[in-house]
């Protein structure tokens, strides 16, 4: 008989490294045609970070994302970046790019102010123009300003910056400190069917609520959450490295190392909990690795809710689940008075 259960798991996760230097640097150059080039050492591994970093630069400069060309991960030409690890790229590298874009924009404002006959403090960058805040009809294109800044004034609109998250080392006596600059939070709920005759587990649906500060690109956040859940499903039910008595890995390829496919994925509902972190670029934090953290726990809690057994080693294969069910039944029989 199939029995249905629901399980919930919550998590918090730090963004970046612990206390040690965790810096990123960036350079932003505004070109004479109004486009911008961003130099960053970070690596795009499929998570969409270069899209988000381009959006951050575009928002700071008042241009479109399509106007931004991101050059990344070339150690000959790009500045230092600690790496696309620790779910830090949006938060740390994004801050470096935002600061670099602001520095480039400051040069543009210094050039545009006399062109428009106002103070620098009265200007804003929006819709590919530098305009007067209280009188947006009075404006000049960013490309024209960048051209004048470089050709006439001899000061190209180039900004460079680096950013390292503020942390405080832990006091060895009290344990007090600030090892990470910010944290993210999430809750996931899993609904499963468990066959109590075979131990087979079918995940029906997962609901995931994730805090990532301000979502720079909500569609990418949703994709990250779904990708993390797919990894969590594999961790919970399928993926296991097996070794023989001599320590030789006996399932080293995808014919016998079982991973979830699209047919194994449940219905997923993603809720992005919008927040604002004042230390992040436009309030953003991160969402990468935390997406996989609560999934296995939620699934195993759902198994317990369905059939009343705890599987304490991953993955919770059908064999392990059935063994636990049989042990539970045997224990219940022993408790029945003769």
Image (spheres, helix red, strand yellow):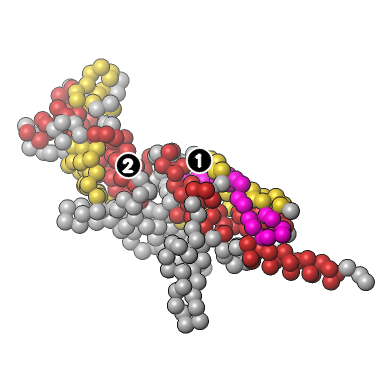
- Residue found farthest to the right: 338
Relative image position of residue 239 (x, y in whole percent) = 51, 62
Find the magenta span and give its range.
194-212
Label 2 – label 1 distance at C-alpha: 19 Å
Q: Image point 78% across, 66% down: which residue?
A: 329
Looking at the picture, tell me which residue is in the foreground, 101 or 39.
39
Relative image position of residue 69 (x, y in whole percent) = 23, 40
Residue 33 falls in image quadrant: top left
Give the secondary structure at mark 2: helix
The residue pinned by badge 2 equals 51
Q: Considering only vertical position in the picture, is 129 above or below 102?
A: above
Quarter of the picture holding the C terminus:
bottom right
Disc 2 crowd, CA 10 A, few/some/many (<14, 14-19, 20+) = some
Could you tell which of marks 2 and 1 lies nearer the N-terminus? 2
Q: Considering only vertical position in the picture, is 313 above or below 268?
A: below
Q: Image point 19% across, 23% down: which residue?
A: 140
- Residue found farthest to the front: 255
Looking at the picture, tell me which residue is in the foreground, 199 or 285.
199
Looking at the picture, tell me which residue is in the foreground, 126 or 70.
70
Q: Can residue 305 be seen?
A: no
Is residue 335 covered in magenta? no
Is residue 207 covered in magenta? yes
Q: Can residue 288 be seen?
A: yes
Q: Is residue 120 left or right of residue 225?
A: left
Residue 157 falls in image quadrant: top left
The residue pinned by badge 1 equals 272
Q: Image point 57% across, 65% down: which residue?
A: 314
Q: Is residue 62 left or right of residue 156?
A: right
Looking at the picture, tell me which residue is in the foreground, 250 or 336.
250
Q: Image point 63% across, 55% down: which residue?
A: 201
């Amino acid at each position: 008989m199939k029995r249905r259960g629901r399980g919930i798991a919550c998590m918090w996760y730090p963004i970046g490294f612990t206390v040690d230097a965790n810096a990123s640097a960036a350079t932003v150059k505004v070109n004479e045609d109004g486009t911008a080039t961003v130099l960053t050492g970070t690596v795009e591994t499929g998570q969409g970070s270069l899209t988000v970093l381009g959006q951050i630069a575009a928002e700071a400069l008042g241009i479109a994302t399509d106007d931004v060309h991101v050059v990344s991960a070339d150690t000959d030409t790009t500045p230092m970046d600690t790496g696309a690890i620790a779910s830090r790229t949006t938060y740390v590298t994004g801050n470096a790019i935002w600061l670099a874009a602001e520095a480039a924009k400051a040069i543009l404002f210094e050039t545009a102010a006399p062109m428009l006959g106002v103070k620098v403090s009265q200007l804003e960058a929006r819709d590919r123009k530098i305009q007067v805040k209280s009188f947006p009809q009075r404006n000049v294109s960013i490309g024209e300003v960048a051209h004048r800044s470089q050709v006439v004034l001899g000061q190209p609109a180039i900004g460079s910056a680096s950013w390292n998250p503020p942390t405080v080392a832990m006091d060895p006596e009290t344990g007090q400190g600030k090892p990470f600059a910010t944290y993210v939070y999430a809750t996931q709920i899993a609904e499963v069917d468990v066959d109590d005759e075979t131990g087979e587990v079918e995940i029906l649906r997962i609901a995931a609520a994730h805090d990532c500060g301000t979502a720079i690109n909500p569609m990418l956040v949703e994709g990250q959450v779904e990708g993390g859940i797919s990894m969590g499903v594999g961790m919970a039910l399928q993926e296991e490295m097996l070794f023989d008595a001599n320590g030789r890995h006996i399932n080293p390829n995808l014919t016998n190392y079982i991973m979830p496919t699209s047919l194994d994925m449940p219905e997923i509902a993603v809720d992005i909990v919008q927040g604002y972190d004042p230390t992040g670029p436009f309030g953003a934090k991160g969402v990468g690795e935390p997406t996989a953290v609560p999934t296995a726990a939620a699934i195993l809690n759902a198994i317990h809710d369905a059939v009343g057994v705890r599987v304490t080693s991953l993955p919770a294969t059908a064999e392990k689940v059935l063994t636990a069910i049989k042990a539970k039944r045997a224990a219940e029989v022993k408790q029945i008075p003769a």
